[in-house]
Amino acid sequence: MNLGSKNKIKIEGGMASMTDLVFLLLIFFIIMSLMSNNQTPIDLPEATESLPASSNPVEPTVIITQDDLYVVMPGGSLDKPMSYEEIKILAADIVDKSGKMKLKIAGHREASYKAVFKVLALSQANGWDPVLAYDK
């Protein structure tokens, strides 16, 4: 006596319904992205304070020439580079006047590493943040 059922149910899933679902989701997201408004108005507060007149927007800069001489900007002249001993006091005065504790260091491509590291050591000794300027 065979009590087994002759009607077998297939448990396999059909891929046709899955592709229809993916296609419908794709259409839904395309339509929603086209309907979204990317230009949402934002109410920004108005500026009520201005910068104090004493603030100097120019950062103090030490430029190292190809002959390992130094120019301190602002205030220095590219026509008259100075030695390291001459710029130590001048750089400290300019950084103090600027009110920033940063010193920008720019150098010629052929300047020696020793000349650059002298200025880095000067900024570290005085507690300034050195900012190395480079050209891409």
Image (cartoon, rainbow, N blue to C red):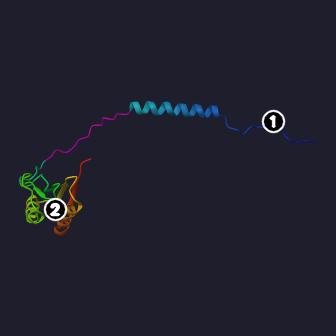
- Which mark, residue 101? 2
Amino acid under label 1? Answer: Asn
Q: Is residue 128 visible?
A: no
In the rendered image, which residue does mark 1 sit on?
Answer: 7
Identify which residue, 36 or 110, lies in the foreground. Answer: 110
Please tell me which of labels 2 and 1 falls first in the chain. Answer: 1
Pinpoint residue 19: horizontal percent, then vertical percent: 59, 32
Give the residue drawn at x 38%, y 33%.
36
57 in relation to 25, above or below:
below
Magenta includes 66? Answer: no
Specify start and end residues of the magenta stretch as a single range. 36-47
Q: State left or right for residue 83 relative to residue 17.
A: left
- Which mark, residue 36? none
Q: Residue furthest right?
A: 1
Instruction: Name the main secondary structure of what is drawn in magenta.
Output: loop
Give the residue drawn at x 10%, y 64%.
92
Pinpoint residue 29: horizontal percent, then vertical percent: 46, 34
- In the rendered image, which quarter contains the N terminus? top right
Q: State left or right for residue 117 relative to residue 2.
A: left
Magenta includes 38? Answer: yes
Name the quadrant containing residue 120. bottom left
Q: State left or right for residue 25 relative to residue 18.
A: left
Pinpoint residue 22: horizontal percent, then vertical percent: 55, 34
